[in-house]
Image: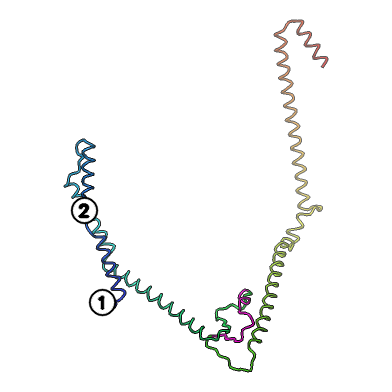
Amino acid sequence: MDDHSQSITALKSAFIRSQVRHLSTPLEASTPWREFATRVGNEGGGVGSHLSDKVIEHIVSKVNEKIKHHNRMLYSQQSQRHVAEQIETLYWNILSTERQRAEEQERENELEPDAVVIRAETDLTDTNAIEDLLPEQYDELFLRPDQQREDETVDQDTIYTDLRAELLELSHERDALREKAARYRHLRKMLAPLEEPQTNVQPNLVTRDGELAKELDRMRILLARVTGRIGEMKNISGTRVEETQSENTSRLISGQTDRQKLAMVMDMDMT
């Protein structure tokens, strides 16, 4: 049967079957591999280091069985048919999209060379979209490809120019108002803590019987306690130092002669 008379599904199914047959071809140990295995076995020495042909055939047979089972599970006839149908579907979808684009291009080419076409999906509320509209020097204006001039006396290019300029000006004014509103929203967000002065402002003011005044009183009391505690710790440390010095002096005096003891006492009185 000629390939041109077959469907895409049939052609792709035949191709997939041929590839599956290649993958399912039984493996065989090549002669160089057998020679290498024999040489390694002889060089290694020892009992059981040589791979016999029977062992090699057994291993290759097990591998072929695994490959056959794997291909049977993954590449069944139903799976091959499903893949081929998906390929055909994708192919026709691509052709349909290209045909639609070609038809749209052909309809646009049928318009006059200087025609202005505004697509239906154009967002005329976007400043960038308005600025991207074709300039004003075109002679014809068609809002749709199938629309034709109805009144030859109407100067549509002038109307288009005026409307485009007005629309662009309004769009710029709207953008400026949006920026201004954004600044106002930001300022309002910054001033939000001042909206409830009794809750957010008053507690932070130093007033009689206020929250901040009470907190300062508690800090003064705490500071006094800490100062007293530190003074007590200094007195205890000074007493311990004096006791340590006295013990050290006694130890020094006990180990010296009478003349050395008298000289040390005289030095201490002078200091």
How is the structure coloured here? rainbow
Q: Which type of secondary structure does the marked residue at label 2 adopt?
A: loop
Spot the residue most to the left.
54
Q: Where is residue 116 in the image (x, y as percent from the top left)?
A: 58, 83
Q: Where is residue 15 in the image (x, y as percent from the top left)?
A: 28, 68
| Residue nearer the viewer, 233 or 27 | 27
**Crowd class of label 1 (few under 14; some 14 to 19; many from 20; radius 10 Å):** few
User: Which residue is denoted by mark 2 in the rendering?
Assistant: 28
Please give the label number shown on residue 17: none
Q: Please report contact status of discs 1 and 2: CB closer than 8 Å, yes or no.
A: no
Split into 4 quadrants, where in the image is the C terminus?
top right
Q: Position of residue 60 (x, y in %)?
A: 21, 51
Residue 246, picture quadrant: top right
Q: Inspect the image, locate mark 2, and give the three-letter code of the amino acid beneath it.
A: Glu
Q: Position of residue 220 (x, y in %)?
A: 77, 43
Split into 4 quadrants, where in the image is the N terminus?
bottom left
Q: Which type of secondary structure does the marked residue at label 1 adopt?
A: loop
Residue beneath the point at 40% across and 77% down: 95
Residue beneath the point at 22% across and 41% down: 39
Residue beneath the point at 35% across and 71% down: 87
Relative vertical location of residue 139 with respect to residue 229 in this rendering, above or below: below
Spot the residue most to the top.
258
Marks 1/2: CA–CA distance: 36 Å
Magenta segment boundaries in residue numbering: 128-144
Q: Inspect the image, locate mark 1, and give the three-letter code of the amino acid beneath it.
A: Asp
| Residue nearer the viewer, 22 or 200 | 22
Residue 44, picture quadrant: top left
User: Which residue is denoted by mark 1 in the rendering?
Assistant: 2
Relative vertical location of residue 83 with respect to residue 100 in this rendering, above or below: above
Q: Nearer the viewer, mark 1 or mark 2?
A: 1
Residue 137 is a magenta residue: yes
